């Protein structure tokens, strides 16, 4: 596969150079398979494969981008011609450039031969085992909406006019389950997902039990009065907040004035117990890869350390604009997309307290297990108001489930009010978080 992609890339570079242009070629080949079960029986089985080339040209600061899924010589020549035409009409930008190669890249083990080697029956049995585990774990689990297995593999190759050449290959396997629990006339849904670099790391029993727990713990929920309470946020919910925090750390968002962290480098922006690291070199990490979408080597980047903002996340363009070195955060969704600032393995580092210790330290509070509407949070002001659900904490113990509430406040206050970080770090895709405790959070109820 590398030979096929390299030959296509070399043809594109050669054609661009003949036009007097600097060029960058990003090529990828992807394969995916998804099977979905209902009541233990296979309902759908899908496979997909695609391959293509994304081409960026530069001419005196003018940039053009085109892509094609046809890697024939004629199609590549046409793509180059189209890009040359586009360059005539785009505005010049002094910061447009390509990274200078060659680089040295870390050797990462990101491909598991057992994924393609495992037979389809084994993968079906894992999804069935998750269903069975959920039903065994609690008799209130009444309906399995869907269970499934998914896998994907991808090869990426990148080369440019400055001698950069980068190639990498990776794959993953994923197991998921969605169900409904009922008690009397009330129903609650539950979902769990596990994604790993190695198929042997998937645990159907854990997926089934977790989906069941998330459903049954919400049954017989009540509403509470509006108040301000200490809150503990479970890892999955905190990992969702990390998506918002990653956006705030984007140098692109900062340079456009769309982040509340503008001008905050070197300042305390969070509680001293909070540290966040982005690590593209993490062994078996879902966001790990030897290089980013521009060929810059992946690295470990401490973004917030003990509450202090250490750096923004930069791709090549935003780094040139800021006069700093790229942190290797130019990410691409596919060959059809331009690179943009994005995180790799984005990790809120674990603390020392167990979740039980954090709960025991709260006389009356809220353990938050669900949030809704995080996309409505304002990244510039930091204001948020989110639907939520969870469990009331009374005298250091989890009490009854709570639903129909809203949590609100400002993200700066949210980060500053974290007074404990748990030791229960968990990965959810390429984001990882432990439980965290906030000294106070506004809760709107009945």
Image (tube, rainbow, N blue to C red):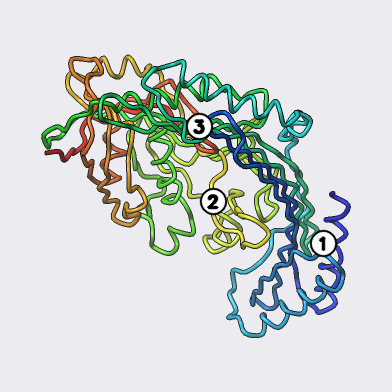
Q: Is mark 1 on a helix, strand or loop?
A: helix
The correct choice, above or below, for 445 with respect to 52 in the image is above
Report helix, strand or loop for mark 2.
loop
Q: In this view, does 341 lie above or below 350?
A: below
Query: Which mark is on residue 340?
Result: none
Q: Is residue 85 left or right of residue 377?
A: right
At which x and y percent is residue 321? 54, 64
Depth check, front residue: 108 or 40: 40
Q: Is residue 42 above or below residue 243?
A: above
Residue at the image position 72 percent from the left and 40 percent from the top: 170
Please tell me in which quadrant of the rendered image residue 205 appears: top right
Looking at the image, is mark 3 or mark 1 earlier in the sequence? 1
Q: Decide: marks 1, 2 in contact (CB < 8 A)?
A: no
Find residue 103 and report its horizontal and vertical position in percent: 75, 49
State which tag comes first along the sequence, 3 or 2.
Answer: 3
- Badge 3 is on which residue? 177
Marking on residue 9: 1
Depth order, front residue of 16/313: 16
The residue singled out by tag 2 in the image is: 342
Query: 24 left or right of 419?
Result: right
**CA distance separating discs 1 and 2:** 25 Å
Quadrant housing residue 160: bottom right
Q: Do the residues labelled 3 and 1 touch (CB within 8 Å)?
A: no
Q: Can you say whether 442 is above or below 222 in the image? A: below
Rounded to the nearest angstrom, the CA distance separating label 3 from label 2 is: 28 Å
Nearer the observer: mark 3 or 1; the answer is: 3
* Image-based side of 97 in relation to 318, left or right: right
């Amino acid at each position: 596969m590398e030979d096929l992609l390299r030959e296509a890339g070399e043809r594109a570079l050669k054609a661009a150079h003949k036009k007097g242009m600097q060029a960058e070629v990003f090529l990828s080949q992807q394969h995916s398979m998804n099977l979905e079960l209902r009541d233990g029986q296979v309902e759908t089985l899908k496979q997909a494969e695609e391959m293509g080339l994304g081409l960026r040209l530069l001419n005196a600061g003018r940039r053009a981008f085109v892509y094609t899924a046809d890697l024939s010589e004629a199609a590549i020549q046409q793509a180059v011609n189209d890009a040359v035409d586009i360059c005539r009409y785009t505005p010049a930008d002094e910061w447009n450039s390509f990274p200078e190669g060659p680089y040295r890249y870390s050797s990462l083990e990101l491909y598991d031969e057992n994924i393609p080697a495992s037979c389809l029956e084994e993968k079906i049995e894992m999804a069935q085992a998750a269903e069975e585990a959920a039903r065994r774990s609690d008799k209130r689990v009444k309906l399995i909406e869907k269970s499934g297995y998914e896998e994907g593999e991808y090869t990426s190759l990148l080369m440019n006019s400055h001698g950069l050449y980068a190639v990498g290959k990776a794959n993953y396997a994923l197991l998921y389950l969605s169900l409904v629990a009922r008690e009397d006339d009330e129903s609650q849904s539950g979902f769990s997902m596990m994604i790993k670099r190695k198929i042997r790391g998937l645990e159907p029993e854990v997926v089934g039990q977790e989906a069941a727990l998330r459903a049954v713990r919400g049954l017989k929920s009540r509403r509470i009065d509006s108040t301000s309470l200490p809150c503990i946020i479970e890892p999955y919910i905190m990992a969702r907040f990390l998506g918002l925090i990653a956006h705030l750390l984007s140098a692109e968002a900062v340079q456009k004035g769309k982040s509340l962290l503008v001008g905050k480098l070197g300042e305390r922006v969070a509680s001293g117990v909070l540290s966040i690291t982005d690590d593209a070199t993490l062994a078996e990490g879902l966001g790990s890869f030897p290089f980013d979408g521009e060929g810059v080597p992946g690295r470990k980047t401490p973004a917030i350390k003990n509450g202090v903002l250490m750096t923004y996340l930069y791709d090549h363009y935003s780094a040139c604009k800021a006069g700093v070195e790229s942190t290797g955060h130019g990410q691409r969704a596919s060959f059809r997309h331009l690179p943009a600032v994005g995180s790799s393995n984005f990790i809120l580092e674990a603390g020392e307290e167990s979740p039980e210790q954090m709960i025991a330290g709260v006389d009356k509070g809220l353990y938050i297990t669900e949030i809704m509407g995080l996309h409505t949070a304002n990244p510039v002001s930091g204001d948020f108001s989110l639907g939520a659900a969870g469990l009331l904490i009374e005298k250091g113990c989890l009490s009854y489930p709570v639903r129909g509430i809203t949590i609100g406040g400002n993200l700066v206050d949210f980060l500053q009010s974290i007074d404990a970080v748990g030791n229960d770090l968990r990965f959810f895709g390429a984001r990882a978080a432990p439980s965290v405790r906030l000294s106070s959070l506004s809760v709107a109820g009945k």
